[in-house]
Image (cartoon, rainbow, N blue to C red):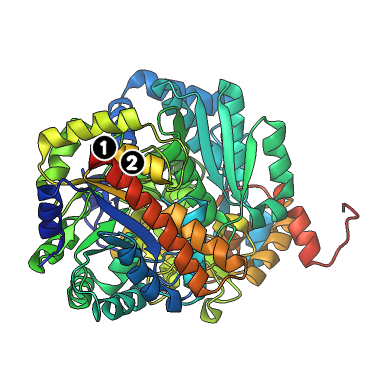
Amino acid sequence: MSRLGPLFDTLRAQNRRALIPYLVAGDPDEALTVPLMHSLVAAGADIIEVGVPFSDPMSEGPTIQKGHERALEGGTSLLSTLALVKQFRETNSETPLVLMGYANPLERKGYAAVADACAEAGIDGLITVDLPPEEVADMNTELQRRNIDNIFLISPTTSDERIVTITAQASGFIYYVALKGVTGAGHLDTDAVEAHLATIREHTDLPVAVGFGIKDANTAATVAGCADAVVVGSALVDLVAKDLIAGGSHDSAISGAQSLISSIRNGVNLATSN
Amino acid sequence: MTIDINPDLYAQVPDEHGRYGIYGGKFVAETLMSALAELEALYNHLKDDPVFLREFDLDLAHYVGRPSPLYEAARWSDMIGGARIYLKREDLNHTGAHKVNNTIGQALLAKYMGKKRVIAETGAGQHGVASATVAARLGLECHVFMGAEDVKRQSLNVYRMKLLGAQVVPVTSGSKTLKDAMNEALRDWVTNVDNTFYIIGTVAGPHPYPMLVRDFQSVIGREARAQSLAMTGKLPDALVACVGGGSNAIGLFHPFLSDNEVAMYGVEAGGKGVETGEHAAPLSAGIPGVLHGNRTYLMQDENGQIMHTHSVSAGLDYPGVGPEHSWLKDIGRVNYVDATDTEALAAFHRVTRIEGIMPALETAHALAYAEKLAAEMTPDQHIIVNLSGRGDKDILTVAEIDGIDLGAS
């Protein structure tokens, strides 16, 4: 059973917004991933989005692309990502985990086998960037059988008609891509985000998370004013990378990530404190 | 070989979902779905519109120089002593390759959509040059994404694009070749989708691209079919074309698909030999998967990561292939074979010396296989090879391989 629905019910009852950090599994090596995940939870993460490394991550900006490349150099795959998730679950059975990745690694292993492995590892939802509603039916069937949420992306270019189609198939939450562009781009227009979210909410009661372009406490606070959840990806991946390139240890990468996530947590909380 | 396939089958692909059997589709991020829908609606409207088709035909006639000749390579055929070989001279097109047929068509679509900015990916640089050319002619801003590795080995084409006013963007991610250039072009398109038309250079990418590129390139096969009947009184016994993404091959093959007596051979880049793993032959040695918006045969590892490819020709150095080729392979209509770097280079030299026609290294793969095929056939039979491009762009590569210092650097 997915942990996403109950979590959002609780948060709504408390008038809180969820904070969702994104990391690439195995970036820069597999030893960092599980300790980093635990530290993100300690710093205030409600859900963790775990990126599955792929050789051709078409929707990622340079920062996350490099994260994928570092993880692939270390040999991280879909299956080893799920092994890391299992390891995380040994001491955390509460925090919802969402896999974010691309279709081909799923196709290669077979949708049913992937859904089985996700259920076994304790995954709550899947976001597959290049499986739009037109192509996702077979995967979705497998996920639904195992009570794993399929999380759809909605973008600034999605028509009202498509919003209806997408929300009819979606569960868990909706992921609103805040800008036309790749991850980590810098041109977030919060007024436009607010307007689009209002349109989406006309068609669904599902929680709406907003990602792409949220870098710090300020942008997070603004977005949390209208969203149910805020996703932070490139800023975290960049910080981990910089620290390690500068010769930092895993410990300093973890403490850097914790202070970033704590500060964004405060930003998110500000949105609902008055 | 005998083929027994219902000829009506070919008119039924792609279906309304852009599928060729299990292949094709629209595997892209949500942000691009509305742009694809808009393009599909426009193209479905224009493809039978006499005004649009007349504009396309006039451009092909007066700007590209069509029809391209069908030429009997008499000395080469005599040397081989088997089937007669005819060359479909796409190398004589403006800009030197078949690529321009498609860029003319897509530039017209961009014009109808009112887009002022076009982007393209390129491997050998032929599609980049063809895109920069139509952009210059229509006064459009043009950005061409090209793998950093290819920028090095195709420096002549890089300079041609710059002369034409295009901005060439070297791509340094991944394997720094065509596949990475396509990733980067898709990223640009996601960012600038409102004002930008993406001119995809081959029969790959998300629907409707494989369909519309096929339709624009099919002028090759329509002409070749009529020319064959006029010159020899019959259809060819076999067709041969090189396959990277596969646009020149589908352009030649498509109008002949219902002619069951015409055998077809798509020649992939065998690189250092398919058995070495260092090649670019997904139809010969790949597995179906999803990349760049479509499901097709791919070179990938057991984890679904796309593998690095190798070919002496930048234009064939791609781990995927157009989805219609994957389908044609599975139903057995087209035979997919390969030619190695060494075989292609030998054919490059041979055809240059015997016929006075210097082929592109991509095309040389088709010529290498055609030579083997013709030798097994008889002089009363004939083969049409798509001479998809000319080799001027490759002379620095060939000189380097042959150990000749041109003193250029």
The residue closer to the viewer here, B4 or B311, is B311
The residue closer to the viewer here, A120 or A189, is A189
Above/below status of A101 relative to B54: below
Percent from the top left, x then y, of residue A97? 25, 65
Quadrant of res A81: bottom left
The residue closer to the viewer here, B299 or A215, is A215
Q: Secondary structure at mark 2?
A: helix
The residue closer to the viewer here, B264 or A208, is A208
Local crowd size for mark 1, using a 10 Å CA cut-off: few (<14), some (14–19), many (≥20): some
Percent from the top left, x then y, of residue A65? 49, 57
Camera sees residue B236? no
Residue drawn 26% across the image and 36% down it: A158
Q: Secondary structure at mark 1?
A: loop
User: Which residue is situated farthest in the front direction here?
Assistant: A274
User: Which residue is situated farthest in the right direction here?
Assistant: B407
The residue to which callout 1 is attached is: A225
> Mark 1 and 2 residues: CB-CB less than 8 Å, in contact?
yes
Percent from the top left, x then y, of residue A222? 33, 37
Residue drawn 50% across the image and 23% down it: B116
Q: Is residue A89 left or right of residue A221?
A: left
Residue drawn 50% across the image and 44% down it: B185
- Looking at the picture, which amino acid does disc 2 mark? Ala
Q: Quadrant of the N terminus of chain A?
A: bottom left
The residue to which callout 2 is attached is: A221
Q: How many marks?
A: 2
- Looking at the picture, which amino acid does disc 1 mark? Gly
Camera sees residue B51? yes
- Separation of residues labelled 1 and 2 (CA atoms): 6 Å
Residue drawn 38% across the image and 75% down it: A35
